[in-house]
Amino acid sequence: MGSSERWWRCRAYSDVIVKLGPRVMGKSQQIDEFVTSHPEKEVVVVQGLGFVGAVMALVVANAPFEEYVVIGVDLPTDEGRWKVKALNEGTFPIESADPTVEELHEQALDRGNFLATCSEHAYEVADVVVVDVNLDVEKATDSDRALRGYDVDLSPFKSACHTVAERCSPETLVIVETTVPPGTCRNVVKPIFDETFEERGLPKTYRLGHSFERVMPGPDYVDSIRNFYRVYAGIDEESTDATRDFLESIIYTDEYPLTRLGSTTASEMTKVLENSYRAMNIAFVQEWTEFAEEVGVNLYEVIEAIRKRPTHRNLMFPGLGVGGYCLTKDPLLASWARSAHGNGDGNAHLPQSETAVEINDRMPRHTFERLQTALDDTVEGKTIVLLGVSYRKDVGDTRYTPAEYLYDLLEERGAAVRLHDPYVEHWEERDREVRQELEAVFTDEVDAVVFSTPHSEYKDNAELQRRLHALPERIVVHDAWGVLSDGEIGALQSTHHVQVTGRGDLHSEGTYSTEADFSPLSSLDSPTTTTSSA
């Protein structure tokens, strides 16, 4: 940091003290003293202490190739203040199965180079600002989860950018990690900084880059940041180089090299395209899941056979549905961006991407309908156990979990739903307590059990199998993820009605055709055959 830069910040400190008064001065003084206690170290401010920002701040505070002073900033809401207090007192505010999170947290507090705050004064002392602010898609759906429309509200994101632009120094490097519609840095963020700096009478010497996160919940929470591949770009060469230098200081790039792209729009597109591809892959398998069930085929063995081809190894297996923060919305961000920033008439979209989101959102209905059919066409008054409420195997993350729609369908139609998940104690989105002991959900009064999350704990679990076999009445067991082995399925079929999504070979409903009496050609040649489109 040069002498002119230090002078500018000293002037800014004086200005903010005069304008904001003693209450804010206390927070500002805390930040100033914190920074002063680490002379000659660059200050990195992480904006947003959510699922990505909280762990990003700890990774930067423990950067392997540079010693940073790190300040995490969240909004001065009840939730934001709670996160700040928890982080400063040594409690990570997000449940994590990765023990490295706790290790990094303890190390940062021991070193004294990490501070969480709600004070915007942090941006005035920043050399680098990493933007990790959520950007949501507002979907309009009907009762069947058919997608009727959607919108992207950029207002909170814009507000966050304005806050930084109004306070940061002229030479600050701003890196947007948030997943945004392609064109956002160019068409939204850069104009905000240009206009604000002009109003402040400052030269437009800030640097602006984009490098999206690929953070994954579970045991690889930390490694998905510092031990994983990154894409980056900037609005100009200087910004791109600065973004690269920062990333190289926190990521083990000798093993996970960075990929430099030609524009921030290209970087933004990379994130939404890779997630759209995965979402479409999942949606594609759904219609084949239904087809396989209709014609008595085990789709799992079909896919395994296809996956032997190197070009087809990522073909997805059947499942309950799609959850999490990314795949449920990112394809829509891209489609919205084409309409908002493309060269068309404003009506251009990405229809295949939109359709994939709709198919995936509606997938849990397939499990519900099969379950309902097996229960004499009604779930009213039935007691149904859901094994798993998180959206992903071996994590406690319930954001947009497909189990939510299945749960809603069961509740709306009068079922009594019991919940079990070894990683979740309270289901925040449905305000339901979740049991973590099998004996709490397995009683004599059970009509159906659904494997709704493929947790490792449910696989080859002798206690779980014993409790299923011990139930006094014949029940429906529906495995939505292929958790059960063939041996377990065979044993359970002796006493229960077993269904597995994508396993038409089980014939457990008595409605499937056998291979002997099913003729694809005769079916296709039938004058009653129709073709439908999603």
Image (tube, grey):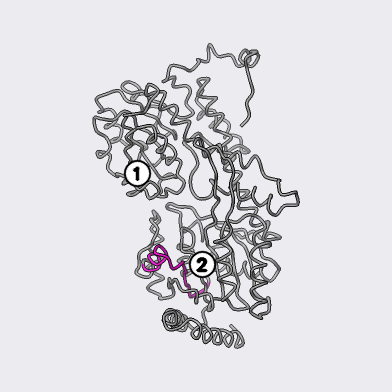
Tally of marks: 2
Local secondary structure at mark 1: loop
Local secondary structure at mark 2: strand
Name the residue carrying label 2.
Answer: 47
Which label sits on residue 450?
none
Q: Report x, y in % for residue 161.
A: 58, 67
Say if residue 240 shows up in the picture.
no
| Callout 1 amino acid | Asp
Residue 259 left/right relative to 509: right
**Mark closer to the observer (2, 1):** 2
User: Which residue range is magenta in the image?
Assistant: 66-85
Q: Is residue 344 magenta?
A: no
Residue located at (43% from left, 72% from top) = 117
When the figure is inspected, residue 351 is found, relative to residue 109, above or below; the finding is above
Sequence order check, earlier mark of 2 and 1: 2
Quarter location, residue 486:
top left
Q: Is the residue marked by circle 2 packed among few (<14), some (14-19), or many (20+) residues within 10 Å?
A: many
Residue 105 left/right relative to 303: left
When the figure is inspected, residue 46 is found, relative to residue 138, above or below; the finding is below
Q: Quadrant of the N terminus?
A: bottom right
Quarter location, residue 350:
top right
User: Which of these two is toward me, 436 or 334?
Assistant: 334
Name the residue carrying label 1.
Answer: 421
